Image (cartoon, grey):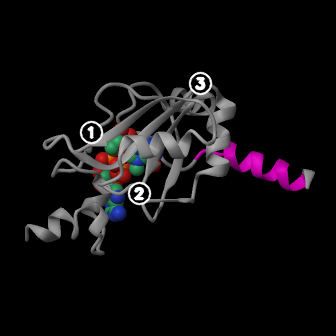
Amino acid sequence: MALFDARARDKARELSAYRDQRYSGSLRDQEQQLKNSTTLYVGNLSYYTREEQVYELFGRAGDVRRVIMGLDRFKKTPCGFCFVEYYTRDEAENAIRCVNGTRLDDRVIRTDWDAGFIEGRQFGRGKHGGQVRDEYRKDFDPGRGGWNKIVATK
Ligand code: GTA
């Protein structure tokens, strides 16, 4: 049991391959911030998921300081991601352990360490205002606007 706990703990501390290309400092600074951060990025949300649901789910892992919903930068409507800030690193690690890979609105959500929210980062960066990944997917996803915007406008 102790061995299992130790492995699970290490996994929660690992960084994914994602790095924000618009981060203003060096790659090293970004990695340092990721390692000390109390903020999580949450991806694969339904466009219909509400902020209160995010508080409810992530609140099970610790005290949530703030939730910032990701928005379509033109329509200012939810576009399928958010940032969750905790007060402590332990609480954020706990969320990665307990909430990552679970379902919210019947979708498997993905949590990732984030270097920290700054104004502007809540907006989708895709050409159509939503997330970049929604312009590359090939499937019909009713929780995320149906077909991807590029296919839909062809
Ligand atoms: N911490 O995993 C993440 C993460 N993601 C996916 C987005 N954000 C994340 N933060 C963390 N971890 O604040 C944050 C961004 C921003 C906000 C919205 O969410 O930092 P976005 O999803 O609209 O755009 O961001 P982002 O993250 O800049 O795009 P991404 O997915 O990294 O793509 C970068 C480039 O890779 C694109 O320009 C595109 O050329 C290429 N690309 C992306 N997906 C594909 C694909 N499926 N096929 C081919 N090329 C692709």
Q: Which residues are magenta?
A: 3-15
Q: Residue 134, located in which quarter of the rendered image?
A: bottom left
- Toward which corner of the image does residue 146 lie, by quadrant? bottom left
- Principal secondary structure, stretch drawn in magenta: helix
Q: Nearer the viewer, residue 23 or 58?
A: 58
33 or 69: which is nearer to us? Answer: 69
Spot the residue most to the bottom: 139
Mark 1 and mark 3: span between their CA atoms?
Answer: 23 Å
Tell me the crowding category of disc 3: few under 14, some 14 to 19, or many 20 or more residues within 10 angstroms, Cα based: some
Is residue 21 in view from this perspective? no
Foreground label between 1 and 3: 3
Instruction: Identify residue type, mark 2.
Output: Asn
Residue annotated with mark 1: 123
* Label 1 to label 2: alpha-carbon separation: 15 Å
Residue 83 location (% of width, % of height):
43, 38
User: Which residue is the site of mark 2?
Assistant: 44
Could you say whether the residue bearing mark 1 is in a helix, strand or loop? loop
Mark 2 is surrounded, within 10 Å at the Cα level, by few (under 14), some (14 to 19) or many (20 or more) other residues, namely many
**Disc 3 element:** loop
Q: Secondary structure at mark 2?
A: loop
Front residue of 114/69: it is: 69
The quadrant the N terminus occupies is: bottom right
Membership of 11 in magenta stretch: yes
